[in-house]
Image (cartoon, rainbow, N blue to C red):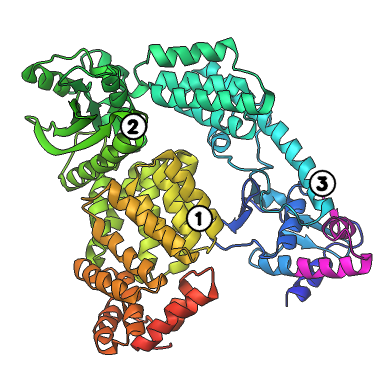
Amino acid sequence: MAVKSARRLADRLPGDSRAADANPPSRKVVRIHLVGAMQAMTYAGSPVLPRGRKARAALALVCLSRGKLVSRSRLAAMLWDRVPEAQARASLRQALSELASAWSCVPGLLEIGREQVRLRDEACWIDAVELPEANRPTRADGDQDYLAGLSGTLLEDLDGISAACDQWLREERTRFETRLRKACESRLFEMAEQDAPQQQRAQVARTLIEHDPTHEGAWQALLSALLSLGDRAQAIREYQRCREALKDALDVTPSEATERLYLAARSQPDVPAYSKLAEAPASPGSTFGGRLRVGILPFVATAPLLDPSLCWSLGLDTAAALARFRWFDVIAPVGLAALDSDQAGLERSLAELMVDYAIRGTLTPIGDGIRVRVVLLRLHGPAQTIWSDSYDLPMDALGEADERVTTKLVARIDPVILQIEGSRPGRREGSEATRLVLKAIPLLYSLEQRRYAEAGAILREATALAPNDSMVAAWTAFWFLFHVGQGWSDGPEHDYAEAERLSRHAIDLDPENAEALGIYAHLCSFVHHDFEAASHYFDQSLILNPSLAFIWALSAPTSCYMGRPDDALRRLKRYRELAPFDPYHRLFESMDTMVHLFARDYEKAAMIGRRAVRASPTFTNGYKPLISALGHLGLGDEAARYIATLAALEPGFSIAAFARRYPFQFREDRDHYIEGLRKAGVSED
């Protein structure tokens, strides 16, 4: 069928002439990513990327030809450079047939003729081609966001196809890196002239550094932006990366200008951009944009410490770690250091600054170490202690304070605030979209159909209020994903397409939104069965925010699908370490059932599964690994009760439906899971 389609397309290209373009598309209908792992999908959500690497390479070459005709002889010579010409052309016909089949859902865009191939790129958005030209004003649709999101090597998964293809890749990558460098340099210069937000400058600088680690101008732009944002700790870490990159590549040290920025980070930390309003008292009733505000009070020591700077550095590191969460603003200790020290005066000052929560830390010497006690205060009215915890830090591990203290404490604070804010009936004017998201999250995690539908309605309302809010888009994408996963969707393809669109939109709006990256990673795994891309985006998410406990848990199923239950257990263990009292742990407990099923520990899978479905009786995916484990244990009578409950929650569930939807990298894992369902008595169709 695909060969016939290719032949029909061939009739549109007589000889060497270009096909008539009587009806050019009025809009982009296909989105193609060539930077990083190759991806291609229509805007309606249909994948158009062929499975074969050589078919993908042929598509890549056509994409980078910018709408020009590409001869079949060139494609054959490049992809099959060590076989006779006749054999190469026969292999090319097969690859083009696969390509034509993949693009059959968008007829007319990929034109495959008898001698030549062409892509009508006016109807395609191609990241490497859309790269803005240097010295050109930024478009209204946001070149800076596009530049901030370019991560990875051009066509990084196509190396080794052939010697000729590798040579072509080297040439294309050189051209692309040169264009990207010039575009980023031009954009950074433009942003400096326009006094653009420091966060945007930092994102573009990071893109330039990723592609050219020795570009000292980009390092200076990044350090300067971080200093303006008040992220002293991150500025110091980035300087160390800069120093290592220059040493490894060029055997040189940073310039005097870079050293000055480093010294400024060490000695004179600035107030964060989001905290500058804390330098002066706020007028009563001002809203600062209405966002939730968390203040970090300067940490204090109850007795002299060997390292007197430890209080200051822990407070700043806590502020930097909390700032990675996208749904509240953080006031660093430097912004609150001058406030009154007595309780009544401090509360008045925090109320004037409209701080919603405050974090207070004390350091006490104990034996051969230090005990760090942290208290979270709620400031809606008189200050109330709503959470506290202690962390012991040995003297010989002071350099590990970030891992032993900061990462854990911020991971535990976030869900506490999230739960409180989600249950509040209202918040001050100006933060309506954020308030709606916080209200929707507990309903979403309930996984009870009526409340889940209510969460969807709330998120639609938030989207209408703030269509370009990254967190609104990310959590709405999450809603669509689990709506299909629960078996409640009347249009799974539509919902998956919406999840794809919204998660990408969230990342485009904020490339450093760790929640959005993690949600998109889960989509890559569960929907597209693209485990390599899923692993990449999960890693990116957890690099940006290693304290994001729910992403550690959400990444565990992907490790299972890849046949790595040990890695999945490690991720769930990390989730529990970071959020041992997570109010939404019931959702993630069922993932433990799956992990132990994949590990062939049926007794433990059944034990955890029984507990998980009691805790979350409407979470349909909690029943499936439990039923499979019971099947392997020969407990069909017990499994029958759970099968009946699952059938009521997800009508039409069967082995065939499960096999169509669930992703497995290895056939033996798929067969093993299904065999347990079959032994338990699940119907085939």
Whichever of callouts 3 and 1 sits on the residue coming sooner in the sequence is 3
Residue 22 showing in the rendered view = no
Estimate the spatial distance between the alpha carbons at disc 3 and disc 1, rounded to whole Å. Answer: 29 Å
- What residue is shown at x 76% (from left), y 70% (from top)? 97
Q: Quadrant of the N terminus?
A: bottom right
Give the quadrant of residue 278: top left
Q: Quadrant of the C terminus?
A: bottom left
What amino acid is at disc 1?
Answer: Ala
| Label annotation for residue 397 | 2
Q: Is residue 85 left or right of residue 207?
A: right
Q: Which residues are magenta?
A: 68-97
Look at the image and say whether residue 77 sits in the magenta stretch: yes
Whichever of callouts 3 and 2 sits on the residue coming sooner in the sequence is 3
Q: Quickly name the residue at label 3.
A: 167
Horizontal and vertical percent position of residue 132: 65, 34
Q: Main secondary structure of the magenta part?
A: helix
Estimate the spatial distance between the alpha carbons at disc 2 and disc 1, rounded to whole Å. Answer: 34 Å
Question: Measured along the vertical axis of the image, is residue 528 above or below residue 677?
Answer: above
Q: Nearer the viewer, mark 3 or mark 2?
A: 2
Estimate the spatial distance between the alpha carbons at disc 3 and disc 2, rounded to whole Å. Answer: 49 Å
Q: Nearer the viewer, mark 2 or mark 1?
A: 2
Q: Quickly name the residue at label 1.
A: 534
Look at the image and say whether residue 647 sits in the magenta stretch: no
